[in-house]
Amino acid sequence: MAILGVAAGAATEMAAALKAKRPRISSPAALPRSAWAGVLRNTYREIMEDRVQAVAAGVTFYSLLAIFPAITVFVSTYGLFANQADVVDHVAMLTSLLPSGAISIVTDQIERITSGSGSRLGLALVSGLAMAMWSANAGTKAVIEALNIAYEVRERRSFIMLNLQALLLTLGGLFTLIVLIGVVAVVPVVLHYVLIDGIIDWVLWIGRWPFIYVLLLMGLAVLYQFGPNRPGVKWRWITPGSALASAGLLVFSMLFSWYTANLGSYNETYGSLGATIAFLTWMWLSAVIVISGAEFNSEIENAARKR
């Protein structure tokens, strides 16, 4: 009975703490215009105080460990229904969004996996899933820890619950990638049947950016909602950071891809490691943007609690 009493008291105390941290106004839109300048200043200050750049470097390291098992799972699933040329060509369609170093690293791994027979691909799927259970979870949990730092909360979920949520977020990311590449591969074929050839390229160029933005927005919203240890948070409080970080990721990836293709000298500086360094730089700065989006959401809530 004493143990139950202590547990109940702890639960009540946690609920009261969460309630005290909830914003006092209904939504971010209710913040006055004068408050937004303070939100931006405080976001920058928190990014510096929380050492977001260093935290993002840790996320990049664990993500690098996770990405190759994740590619194995993705390509093994995709490769069971498509040949090697299809998989490589479909991924290569993302060159305007990802730096050339990232594309070359990913396509090299794809070629190694899809060069096997169908039975080997099936075996690779099973072994890849087993490796991804640990490696990909480590990468996702690094992101979760970074979001906990941004929101200034402690991780109190059980080992099983934390790993389960990390696994679900990882699978959600893989599913999003499959949808993205699938649409990139299928939409041009469909448009050839319904549009004149002369305007297909223009429609694809204009239409793909809103689609990619919406995918990023949905993915980051889910990450901000279920990643950090913040149960019961309304979706409207994670929308501003999701929208800002999605736009930042899209613009940054386009500019970085253009820079590495036209002005970057990674190969001249780092030799054979140039593609890898470019890929790591892109992952690191992308992680900075994602964590900064969470910092922005956190400061919006802080401003709302003061109203």
Image: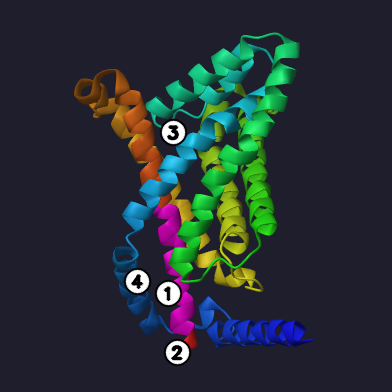
Tell me which corner region of the image, top left, top right, bottom left or bottom right, holds residue 81: top right
Q: Which residue is mark 1?
A: 299
Q: Is label 4 in a helix, a strand or a loop?
A: helix
Magenta segment includes 298: yes
- For the residues labelled 1 and 3, the Cα–Cα distance comes to 30 Å
Give the magenta-colored segment's residue range: 288-304
Quarter holding the N terminus is bottom right
Q: Which residue is mark 2?
A: 306
* Residue 152 percent coordinates (x, y): 46, 71
Q: Is residue 275 visible?
A: yes
Q: Is label 3 in a helix, a strand or a loop?
A: loop
Q: Earlier in the sequence, mark 4 or mark 1?
A: 4
* Residue 59 percent coordinates (x, y): 44, 47
Q: Earlier in the sequence, mark 4 or mark 3?
A: 4
Q: Residue at x 59, y 84 (%)?
A: 26
- For the residues labelled 2 and 1, the Cα–Cα distance comes to 11 Å
- For the residues labelled 2 and 4, the Cα–Cα distance comes to 15 Å
Q: Is label 2 in a helix, a strand or a loop?
A: loop
State the mark number for residue 40.
4
